[in-house]
Image: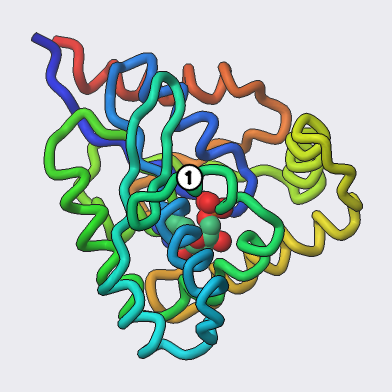
């Protein structure tokens, strides 16, 4: 039987992590874990309860009373917040523009990392986020850091939005992506940074399939033989 490994995929906002991670997981029949969805689910609940995202303690208390479940469904992943399906709601513009504030608190990250490690306790996992290769799964056999120009990332988000029937402002999208990158990279607790042993892939002029294939090739060198 082929040996199962753990694959960590990190990178800035909208670099294609989740699409690529999902595809790699599907090809290998591995579990896909979207850690950004966990921070998004907490942010959604805090916004609904009008909890100040800058205040670490109330937010950490809220997380202790919050159940976030990631369920595999066909090719996709369903996100349940206290048992309710919030898969679409956590992708709203409001959650997107607030999530980096919730994700910067050490107490929140500590709890999330524990939950993420528990989810990855078995091998055969593809996990994506910002700190997977550096903090959550430092022993992952394959570590990938995806990057792309901000113009390309905004263009991809724009097209995703069009498909959902929204007509976003391109400049606004660029600003939001840059702002999220800035907060995620400048925070003290587990900032967005490439792990020393990660392979960087610039996806600006690559298709999803090409990126996935590069990761699958790396995985194959470890699992075959
Ligand atoms: O990958 P995403 O856009 O869904 O992530 C949403 C936010 O969550 C991102 O701006 C930063 C935070 N995040 C994080 O701090 N650490 C992770 N492992 C995943 C996401």
**How many marks overall?**
1
Q: Position of residue 47 (x, y in %)?
A: 56, 73
Residue at 63 percent across and 60 percent down: it is 96
Q: Where is residue 172 in the image (x, y as percent from the top left)?
A: 86, 60
Q: In this view, does 107 lie to the left or right of 166?
A: left
Residue at 90 percent across and 56 percent down: it is 171
User: In this view of the protein, can residue 150 be seen by the observer?
Assistant: yes
Place residue 94 in its image quadrant: bottom right
The residue beneath circle 1 is 145
Q: Image height check: is 138 above or below 164? A: below
Q: Position of residue 57 (x, y in %)?
A: 36, 90
User: Of 192 and 90, which appears nearest the observer?
Assistant: 90
What colour-coding does the image apply? rainbow
Q: Image height check: is 198 above or below 6? A: below
Name the quadrant of the N terminus.
top left
Q: Is residue 91 left or right of residue 64?
A: right
Disc 1 crowd rating (10 Å Cα; few below 14, some 14-19, many 20+) is many
Helix, strand or loop under label 1 = strand
Residue at 49 percent across and 22 percent down: it is 212
Name the quadrant of the C terminus.
top left
User: In this view of the protein, can residue 142 be seen by the observer?
Assistant: no
User: Of 110 and 136, which appears nearest the observer?
Assistant: 110
Place residue 92 in its image quadrant: bottom right
User: Of 92 and 11, which appears nearest the observer?
Assistant: 92
């Amino acid at each position: 039987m082929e040996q199962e490994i753990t694959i960590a995929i990190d990178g800035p906002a909208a670099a294609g992590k989740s699409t690529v991670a999902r595809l790699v997981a599907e090809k290998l029949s591995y579990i896909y874990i979207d850690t950004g969805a966990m921070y998004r689910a907490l942010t959604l609940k805090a916004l609904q309860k009008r909890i100040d995202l800058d205040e670490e303690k109330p937010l950490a208390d809220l997380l202790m009373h919050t159940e976030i479940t990631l369920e595999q469904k066909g090719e996709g992943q369903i996100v349940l917040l206290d048992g309710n399906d919030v898969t679409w709601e956590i992708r709203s513009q409001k959650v997107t523009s607030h999530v980096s504030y919730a994700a910067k608190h050490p107490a929140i990250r500590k709890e999330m990392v524990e939950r993420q490690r528990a989810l990855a306790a078995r091998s055969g996992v593809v996990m994506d986020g910002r700190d997977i290769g550096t903090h959550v799964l430092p022993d992952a056999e394959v570590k990938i850091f995806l990057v792309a120009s901000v113009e390309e990332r905004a263009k991809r988000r724009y097209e995703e939005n069009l498909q959902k029937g929204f007509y976003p402002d391109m400049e606004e999208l660029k600003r939001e992506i840059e702002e999220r990158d800035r907060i995620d990279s400048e925070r003290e607790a587990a900032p967005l940074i490439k792990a020393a042993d990660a392979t960087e892939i610039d996806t600006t002029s690559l298709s999803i399939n090409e990126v996935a294939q590069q990761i699958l090739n790396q995985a194959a060198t470890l699992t075959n033989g």
